[in-house]
Image (spheres, helix red, strand yellow):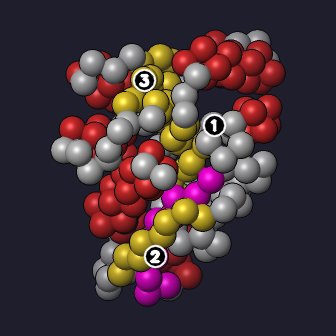
């Protein structure tokens, strides 16, 4: 299975996928390209260090959102992946791309959907909301992408305990280590192997 990984920042989930492919917990899968909307994303360095094609397509480089969307869709079409993995990609996916690649785009979200998801819930904001609400359990969800924000069919979820004294940063790290880096590679392996 040929996958494209879309990422905006450091690329820790990308690294989990790269490691999964190397250690064979993700079978029959190859990352054909990493695309970032941020030229300074460390994820692009991770791609280069692992011999993976990396590309920046930023809304800032286009006059309109439509032009950016068109460029993103063209790039994905050119690579023709079997699966598109959103691994911390903080840009809305164009509706045209969602329609064209139905059931071929997955996302990792750092909560147990339907909690703390949808518009405005990304990065640390998710963990701040969980702590403010006083939940005892949070986690991560891998889901298919549809027209909505975090509304597509759920593939895998993993719960993570919230501990006394957690800060958003500490909780974010635990959710990554105990949930995101576990279920994202697992979901890709499941999809690649029927």
Question: Closer to the N terminus: mark 2 or mark 1?
Answer: 1
Left or right relative to 25: residue 135: right
Left or right relative to 25: residue 191: right
Q: Is residue 146 above or below residue 48?
A: below
For image coordinates 71% across by 54% down, the residue present is 149
Q: Secondary structure at mark 2?
A: strand
In percent of width and height, residue 126 lies at: 53, 63
**Residue 92 visible in this rendered orientation of the protein:** yes
For image coordinates 71% across by 43% down, the residue present is 102
Q: Please name the residue that numbered disc 2 is placed on.
A: 138
Q: Are the residues flagged by discs 2 and 3 in contact, CB closer than 8 Å? A: no
For residue 140: magenta?
yes
Q: Start and end of the magenta stretch?
A: 135-144
For image coordinates 50% across by 18% down, the residue present is 56
Q: Please name the residue that numbered disc 1 is placed on.
A: 91
How far apart, in angstroms, are the residues tagged by discs 2 and 1?
A: 24 Å
Left or right relative to 187: residue 51: left
Q: Secondary structure at mark 1?
A: loop
Q: Secondary structure at mark 3?
A: strand
How far apart, in angstroms, are the residues tagged by discs 3 and 1?
A: 20 Å
Q: Please name the residue that numbered disc 3 is placed on.
A: 32
Q: Is residue 149 above or below residue 90?
A: below
In percent of width and height, residue 39 lies at: 46, 19
């Amino acid at each position: 299975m040929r996958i494209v990984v879309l990422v905006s920042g450091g690329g820790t989930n990308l690294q989990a996928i790269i490691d999964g492919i190397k250690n064979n917990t993700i079978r029959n899968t190859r990352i054909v390209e990493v695309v970032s909307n941020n030229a300074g994303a460390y994820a692009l360095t991770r791609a280069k260090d692992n011999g993976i094609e990396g590309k920046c397509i930023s809304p800032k480089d286009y006059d309109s959102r439509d032009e950016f969307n068109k460029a993103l869709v063209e790039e994905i079409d050119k690579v023709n992946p079997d699966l598109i993995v959103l691994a911390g990609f903080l840009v809305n996916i164009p509706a045209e791309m969602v329609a064209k690649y139905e059931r071929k785009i997955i996302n990792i979200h750092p909560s147990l959907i339907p909690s703390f998801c949808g518009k405005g819930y990304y990065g640390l904001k998710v963990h701040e909301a969980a702590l403010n609400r006083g939940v005892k359990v949070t986690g991560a969800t891998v889901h298919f992408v549809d027209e909505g924000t975090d509304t597509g069919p759920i593939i895998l979820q993993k719960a993570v305990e919230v501990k006394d004294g957690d800060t958003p940063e500490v909780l974010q790290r635990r959710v990554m280590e105990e949930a995101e880096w576990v279920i994202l590679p697992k979901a890709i392996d499941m999809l690649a192997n029927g």
